[in-house]
Image: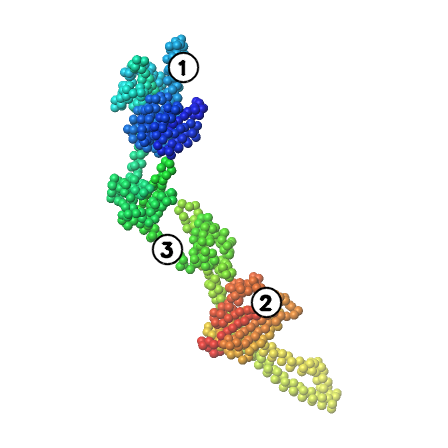
Amino acid sequence: MEKGFAEARRTEQILIVDDEAGIRNLLRELLQKHGYRCRTAADAREARAILEAEPFELVISDVNMPGESGLSLVRHVFENCPDTAAVMVSVMDDPQVAREAFGLGIYGYVVKPFDLECVLIVVENALRRRRLEIENRLHRETLEKLVAERTKQLQVSCERYRELVETLPGVVYTGATDWAIVFVDEKVRDLTGYSAREFLSGEVRWPDIILPEDLPGAKKAFRDALTGCLQFVREYRIRTRSGDAAWIQDRGKIVCREEGKVDHVSGFLFDITERKRTADAIVQAKEEWENTFDAVPDLIAILDADHRIVRMNRSMSKRLGVTLEEAVGRHCHELVHGLSEPILGCPHGRMLNSGEEYSAEIYDERLKGWFHVSCSPLHAPDGRMIGGVHVAREVTALKETARALRRAHAELSQLIEAISSVLITLDSKNRIVRWNSHAERVFGFTADQVRGKRLEDCDLRWQWGRVCDILARCRDSRAPQRLEEVRFTRPNGKQGFLGMVFTPIPREGEEGSYVLIMAADITHRKIMESQLAQAQKLEAIGQLAAGIAHEINTPTQYVGDNTRFLKDAFDEILSIVRGYGALLERVKSEQPDHPDVRAIEELIQEVDLDYLMEEIPRAIEQSLDGVGRVAKIVLAMKEFSHPGVEEKVAVDINKAIENTVTVAHNEWKYVAELVTDFDRGMPNVPCLPGELNQVFLNIIVNAAQAIAEKTGDRPEAKGTITIRTRKNGGNCEIAVTDTGGGIPEEIQSRVFDPFFTTKEVGKGTGQGLAISHDVVVNKHGGTITFESEPGVGTTFLIQLPLDDSNAEKG
């Protein structure tokens, strides 16, 4: 059957009558797209001319047109073109007009603006019903002819007729003018619940099941048909056997004899209950929409393209203090804002200009509040913008809340930015959510550069293994975790230490928690702790050295004094021995065989008296030299340590360097020759002697180690360490030059950085030169610089001010 309908579309022709070209073209394109042939007319006069020239299966006509109305045209079509079906289209949702149109016998009534799918369904149903009605009429005419011409085939024809009736979508009936049923097909049971037999026997009369309130209208439609085209379409309700009400469309024709007397009435009965329910639902939906429209607390208005109010809801009417009737037709800017023209930046005007939805927040002085206004365009069926829907929601309280939140957020942000600690917030995926200004300064990345990135994707030069382990432990344990002394590299390349605390922040509705990382740069603290430890160690060593020097000094004096006594006594004994020798020679010359003489000579030979007389003075001299060196070292240790000195004293800098050289003798004696070039006219220098001696010791030891690295611990040719002092204006200048391997250029900028060292573990802490820099620059107001040539050597130059009024005379 569907294939037959599709083939029928290729031959069925439709006339579209509407005074709006856009509607005509829209319908023509829709129907041609589905295989129908179409022609169009702008009014009833043009349509009449086209209808006289060629036949059409369907006429689609507007109700209101210039000149003759659509209703009149349809009446003309039904009277002059009975095989042509009609469907009406109108912008008027007027039940009276619709009833009048359906009373003429139209097949459908579509309200503009219409849904194209709905139009297509109505057209297909109209043509399908037209074809069925034509087939029915042709069959009936053929049947009448066959009755007259071929009586013998009556039963076959009746059977065919019954089969045809059964396939029709409606109930076929034949009746008399008094509503008596002469014929009705069995489908009447599905429609009414009563059998065909009950109607044919008169047990049930058709007028009796029509609802009393609908019966007068049904009778009037029949009377009108008698005086008119003899065709009628009437809609009324019946009461079914089950007691339910059902809507019926009764489409029929009054058949007259040749003399004009009514012979019978035949027609179709269609169940249009669902269609009526749909129509009622549409009406109900419209009422519900209107109720919803009025129930919305937002201020809603429909404006035309000239800013005039077409409709507004109850909330807006109440807020403005006007009724809907008073507001309709007035300009929005005049009614709402009290202005003669739209406000600057009017949202409705912006929407009209752009053709798109527009929203903005505005403050209305008359309504004393902030409103979020959104405007959405409204279009006519032809696509023209005809106005817009204007929705205003008061956001005054929201604005105040937002302002308070922004103020609180600003205060919190200022507080966070004022904290002198690194603050980093990570989400559950380790993405950076917050990165404060202190983090920017410490790591050299702005918040915009890292926000949204995973922490591990940021080029942070710190101990990643330790950080990642403690971060994972924080998430797993859901407890704060602390990490101390994390090495990191600053943007300028210098190294430092961080103290870090990882704190989980649970987030409601999320699987993982956020983590707040607080970190403080503890490099200065580490330096202070290291320097304090160094100072405490030096003080302890100084105190120990002073004690040892004191303890060694007394026995050394004993040994020295006794040795000098032995030297003097031996000189006197030696004189006596020489006197005895001379005496022995005289006795021997007089009495050579005297037994005492031989005994003494044997004794002299036995003890090797000549050797003793030669070596004992030399041994005593060497002992005195050794005691002197011990005394010198003890004195150097005592003067090097200066335990307990907290204020500057004036010190002989040359002597201080000599003492340091003596103390460090074991560090350099195997690898270098040490040369001093002192300015003997150098005035005393105000300084902290213990700390300055440590500076000299650090530099001399570093020089010796640099030479050892270049030449080895037991070189064939030693290196040279040269220490020079000069008075340079108001400064004392100390230069220490070595012939070591020099300092590589790439690390020269980091030499004075705390904890920076290139030495293997156990041979350097990276604090020596850092402490030296602190002592010279910060504690003495001097400078310490260096010049180095790789492969040649290095010179460290120290400048110390000679004038310090706070220094005590040493």
Distance CA(mark 1)–CA(mark 3): 90 Å
Mark 2 lies on residue: 789
View extreme (top): residue: 152
Mark 3 lies on residue: 410
Whole-percent x, y for residue 161 in the image: 39, 15
| Kind of residue at disc 2 | Glu
Residue at 48% across, 64% down: 527
| Kind of residue at disc 3 | Ala
Distance CA(mark 2)–CA(mark 1): 123 Å
Tag 1 secondary structure:
helix
Distance CA(mark 2)–CA(mark 3): 54 Å
In this picture the colour scheme is rainbow
Relative to residue 13, is residue 638 drawn left or right?
right
Mark 3 or mark 1, which is nearer the start of the sequence? 1
In the depicted view, which residue is nearer to us: 575 or 398? 398
Q: Is residue 410 above or below residue 281?
A: below
Residue at 35% across, 54% down: 407
Q: Quadrant of the N terminus?
A: top left
- Say how many tags the image has: 3
Whole-percent x, y for residue 178 in the image: 27, 16
Mark 1 lies on residue: 160
| Kind of residue at disc 1 | Arg
| Badge 1: residue crowd in 10 Å (few <14, some 14–19, many ≥20) | some
In the depicted view, which residue is nearer to us: 554 or 422? 422
Mark 1 or mark 2, which is nearer the start of the sequence? 1
